[in-house]
Image (cartoon, helix red, strand yellow):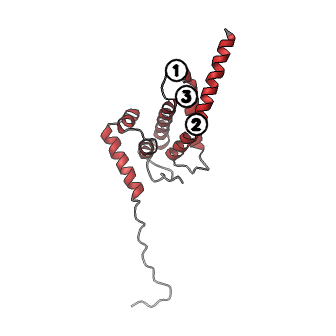
Amino acid sequence: MRARHASHGARRDREFEAFVAGAAGRLLHAATLLTAEAPDANPHARRLLSLSLAHTYASWDRLHGEDPYDRARQYLAARFARGAWHRYGGPVRHRRPAPGPLAALTPQERLILVLRLYEGVAEEQAAALLGLPVERVRTICDRATAALLRPPAAPACPVVPKAGAATQ
């Protein structure tokens, strides 16, 4: 009996290790985009990934044919949304500038943009995951995409006369 449990545990560990080998890089990239950290300095993204993988491992035997990547991504997104709520005082505020490519977006915009465009999650699934209406997810995604494609114009610098120049 004990040998059978040990065999099951070893098989479970091998399956999970194979999953991590294939999925961890993509999940880390998604987490890095969510946290808007630089790819080479992303402690919050690494923590999100670790928590997501730990949660997935803990529920590994209960997946029953579910996609473990989908489960890990759902947990990653939910954990980020909860953390953003507590860290920034709500899903739409953004207090700290970050160096990542999505830094100009709010946490909610980043979350929806990453789910929709990077992860390819359907609007309906993203809306269900976040508890938002589909139209709201579509609007936020469109606004975030437009903000990335058309960043605000740099303010016009006023012409400053040179010192000692004659004025008329």
Residue 132's disc is none
Residue 85 x/y as whole percent = 46, 39
Residue receiving disc 1: 62
Name the residue furthest right: 3
Report the amino acid beneath label 2: Gly
Tag 1 secondary structure: helix
Spatial separation of the CA atoms under disc 3 and disc 1: 10 Å
Residue with the mark numbered 2 = 22
Percent across and percent down for residue 44 are 57, 42
Instruction: Between residue 40 and residue 16, name the one nearer to us.
Output: 16
Q: Amino acid at mark 1?
A: Arg
User: Can you say whether 108 is above or below 130 in the image?
Assistant: below
Instruction: Mark 2 or mark 3: name the one nearer the start of the chain.
Output: 2
Residue 56 marker: 3
Q: Residues within 10 Å of mark 3 (few under 14, many from 20)?
A: many
Rendering quarter of residue 154: bottom left
User: How many numbered marks are there?
Assistant: 3
In the orientation shown, which residue stands out farthest toward the left?
135
Name which residue type carries label 3. Thr
Q: Is residue 28 above or below residue 150?
A: above
CA gap, disc 2 and disc 3 = 14 Å
Percent x, y for residue 14? Answer: 64, 27
**How far apart are the alpha carbons under marks 1 and 2?**
20 Å
Q: Quadrant of the N terminus?
A: top right
For the residue carrying disc 2, how many other residues have a C-alpha within 10 Å: few (<14), some (14-19), or many (20+)? few
Dot 3 falls on a residue whose secondary structure is helix
**Do the residues bearing badges 3 and 1 touch, measured as CB atoms within 8 Å?**
no
Outermost residue, top direction? 1
Q: Which residue is found at the position 49% from the left and 23% from the top? A: 65
**Are dots 1 and 2 in contact, CB under 8 Å?**
no
Mark 1 or mark 3, which is nearer the start of the sequence?
Answer: 3
x 52%, y 20%: residue: 62
